[in-house]
């Protein structure tokens, strides 16, 4: 068993004591190795430190060094070692933003000094500073994940101080969702002169699709014979080095579903597909998208990273996608452009709405027409039935009248 040797390196020099511990480590290649450290003021200090270092060495094979790393330095290390290797490239910018928010508040602390109360104060402070509930929730998740990595495999801290911190409840009142009537919808469609955006709006109104789901709809998900659409992806885009990277990710809450669509929408889709195919054959600038690679997202799900190419070029992969909501040359429709058009249309007809209003109105229209709530939940891809009932069932005149008629029948019969 290795023995700890203690000596004063400045003995006999007239200088202040400089005590050092030293013990023999495992030999490699026939060569002997020693582990040592000096700078201790007393022999006792050197012996205590050496005893601990030897115990840690015997247990792990490495020398123990108390971590003096700051939280900010550690978060940068975690981003480089873990995030860049495991997090989807298109999500890394979001992680970096959250890490900057955390580092701005506790980055100057030593990693080893973090306590649950410090981290809970951080989370509570974000709420007071006006950050959204979603941002605070994500920051809490990043803290737990990053500090778990510091425990294992890095062994920089013994336990994770973020395990028991909680996100405070949102102080904002519940959202009041707006809807519009079928008559208002007719006015909106009449004012929508763009065939591309008319199709997008109908996907929201007739199918209750989220905007990302509608923008991410590709032709392989449309069944013209069965009058159905499969919703199993959403379009996500991010600017990376001035390049727009597009991905197809699973829908929110993994709400994969197949829905039946009305004949009028089927015919509009068929007409749109025919026009796209005709233009692609005649124009060499028409584009399609190859699946470049598959990435793992922070939630462990997979997303497809797309690569644009001209339709008449040789495919670069076995999978190729074409978007339903595409411009004249096949490019996918960007979310900010879609939102801008909806704002303009809203002002034009004098009805205040956003794209998501189409989804709310779709759900309320179904309930108003006595469609069972469970069917509405499945059609819209809600995580729970309570979401359907609490958010999307609005007090419409039709519902109120149905209740009144039911009561009248009960009283008079």
Image: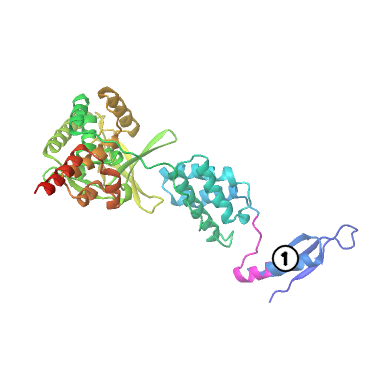
**Residue at x 15%, y 34% (from the top left corner):** 268
Residue named by callout 1: 49
Q: Is residue 363 left or right of residue 160?
A: left
- Secondary structure at badge 1 equals helix
Magenta highlight on residue 102: no
Determine whether 402 is above or below 161 in the image: above
What residue is rendered at 60% in x and 68% in y? 60
Q: Quadrant of residue 105?
A: top right
Q: Nearer the viewer, residue 337 or 86?
A: 337
Q: Is residue 203 left or right of residue 152?
A: left
Magenta span contains residue 62: yes
Across and down, in percent, residue 402 comes to 16, 43
User: Which residue sits furthest bottom?
Assistant: 1
Residue lying farthest front?
Answer: 412
Nearest the viewer among 358 and 47 is 358
Q: Is residue 259 above or below residue 181?
A: below
Q: Provide residue 25's location: percent of width, then percent of height.
A: 67, 69
Range drawn in magenta = 53-67
Find residue 170 and report its image quarter. Answer: top left
Q: How many marks do you count on the picture?
A: 1
- Name of the residue lying farthest toward the top: 348
């Amino acid at each position: 068993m290795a023995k700890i040797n203690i000596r004063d390196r400045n003995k006999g020099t007239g200088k202040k004591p400089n005590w050092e511990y030293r013990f023999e480590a495992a030999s490699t290649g026939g060569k002997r190795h020693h582990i040592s450290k000096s700078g201790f003021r007393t022999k006792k200090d050197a012996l205590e430190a050496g005893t601990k270092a030897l115990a840690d060495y015997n247990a792990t094979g490495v020398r123990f060094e108390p971590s003096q790393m700051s939280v900010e330095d550690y978060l940068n290390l975690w981003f480089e070692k873990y995030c860049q290797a495991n997090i989807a490239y298109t999500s890394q910018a979001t992680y970096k933003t959250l890490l900057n928010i955390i580092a701005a508040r506790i980055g100057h602390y030593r990693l080893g000094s973090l306590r649950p109360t410090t981290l809970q104060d951080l989370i509570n402070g974000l709420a007071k500073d006006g950050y959204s509930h979603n941002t605070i929730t994500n920051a809490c998740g990043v803290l737990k994940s990053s500090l778990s990595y510091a425990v294992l495999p890095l062994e920089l801290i013994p336990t994770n101080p973020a395990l028991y911190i909680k996100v405070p409840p949102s102080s904002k009142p519940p959202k009041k969702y707006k809807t519009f009537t079928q008559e208002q919808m007719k006015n909106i469609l009449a004012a929508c002169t763009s065939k591309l955006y008319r199709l997008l709006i109908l996907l929201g109104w007739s199918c209750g699709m989220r905007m990302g789901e509608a923008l991410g709809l590709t032709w392989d998900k449309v069944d013209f014979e069965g009058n159905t659409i499969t919703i199993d992806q959403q379009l996500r885009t991010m600017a990376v080095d001035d390049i727009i990277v597009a991905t197809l990710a699973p829908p929110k809450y993994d709400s994969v579903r197949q829905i039946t669509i009305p004949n009028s929408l089927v015919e509009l889709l068929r007409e749109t597909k025919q026009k796209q195919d005709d233009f692609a054959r005649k124009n060499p600038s028409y584009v399609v998208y190859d699946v470049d690679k598959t990435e793992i997202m922070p939630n462990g799900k997979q997303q497809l990273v797309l690569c644009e190419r001209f339709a008449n070029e040789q495919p670069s992969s076995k999978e190729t996608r074409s978007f339903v909501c595409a411009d004249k040359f096949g490019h996918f429709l960007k979310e900010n452009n879609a939102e801008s058009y909806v704002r303009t249309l809203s002002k034009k007809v004098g009805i205040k709405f956003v794209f998501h209003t189409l989804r709310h109105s779709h759900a309320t229209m179904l309930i108003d027409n006595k469609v069972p709530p469970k069917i509405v939940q499945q059609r819209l891809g809600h995580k729970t039935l309570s979401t359907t009932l609490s958010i999307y069932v609005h007090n419409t005149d039709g519902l109120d009248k149905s209740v009144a008629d039911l009561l009248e029948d009960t009283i008079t019969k």
